[in-house]
Image: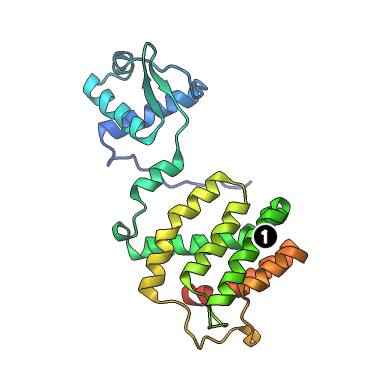
Amino acid sequence: MTAKKKFKKIEPLKNLSLVDKVELRIVEFFKENDLVPGDAIPKELDFAASLGVSRTVIREAILRLRTLGLVESKKHRGMILTKPDVMSNMERVLDPKLLGNKTLKNLFELRLILEMGMADILFARKTEADIGVLEEIVQKEEEEDTVKNSFSLDKEIAFHGKLYDMSNNVTLQRFHVLLLPVFEFVHDQKGGVEKDYKYLNNKFISHRDLLDNLKVGTPETFRSAMRRHLEPHFDKIL
């Protein structure tokens, strides 16, 4: 007979303040009652009576939820549940100068992960108009840039920004805009790609190569090309 496994004791959440606990309990109440955006929620006095706390504590907890965009006040209806704008909350705090180096590094890595993962979406949603815009970006780059084994920051932003735009995913597009200051900050702090950087097989995958792949390749070949295009960045973080 197998002996019953003993689990370690779960320690109580001692560090939570009363407002913290009430905030969590109110969110649980929303979920337990299957509330959806637009539904009215109980009044502060009702929450205070049910939870056995002061109205001041309830008001502070509700204020936090309003800041997060979970609830809002409607004329003649009182407080209602709303659909939070997750990206809006991130926009308030995603300033490179306010973030630590570890967070900046993680966000920079996230940008690389996104660009490696969007290949299937791009091939499913690309249009001739999209390809035309990318062609203009690449032609301008080829006319202006004399260094052929690297890429300038402004051209990098223009080309990759268009890829995010092609995804037709609003959240991804907004997230890209949020990541731009982080990308620029890390680029300025760490420096761009070294002019004498040795690419795999001495082959630099340019924006032209990526564009040609988008025209006639597959998600798999594009993903491979993008990995080699971003090779210097991966080398720096891995």
Q: Label 1's element?
A: helix
Neighbours of disc 1 within 10 Å: few (<14), some (14-19), many (20+)? few
Q: Position of residue 35 (x, y in %)?
A: 50, 22
- Left or right, 137 with respect to 74, comes to right
Q: Residue furthest right?
A: 216
Q: Is residue 231 visible?
A: no
Quadrant in the rendering for residue 44: top left
Compared with 169, 149 (above or below) is below
Compared with 66, 164 (above or below) is below
Which residue in the structure is indicated by mark 1? 132
Name the one closer to the observer, 87 or 125.
Answer: 125
Q: Position of residue 208 (x, y in %)?
A: 65, 72
Name the one closer to the observer, 37 or 156.
Answer: 156
Compared with 133, 173 (above or below) is above
Q: Is residue 52 visible?
A: yes
- Left or right, 6 with respect to 66, comes to right
Say what amino acid the circle numbered 1 marks: Gly
Q: Residue at x 60, y 73 (%)?
A: 229
- Left or right, 123 with respect to 62, comes to right
Name the one closer to the observer, 103 or 162.
Answer: 162
Q: What colour scheme has been applied to the protein in the rendered image?
A: rainbow
Name the one closer to the observer, 21 or 5.
Answer: 21
Q: Residue at x 32, y 58 (%)?
A: 99
- Left or right, 195 with respect to 74, comes to right
Quadrant in the rendering for residue 115: bottom right
Q: Residue at x 41, y 30 (%)?
A: 70
Q: Position of residue 9 (x, y in %)?
A: 40, 44
Q: Residue at x 34, y 39 (%)?
A: 12
Q: Position of residue 148 (x, y in %)?
A: 57, 82
Compared with 170, 95 (above or below) is below
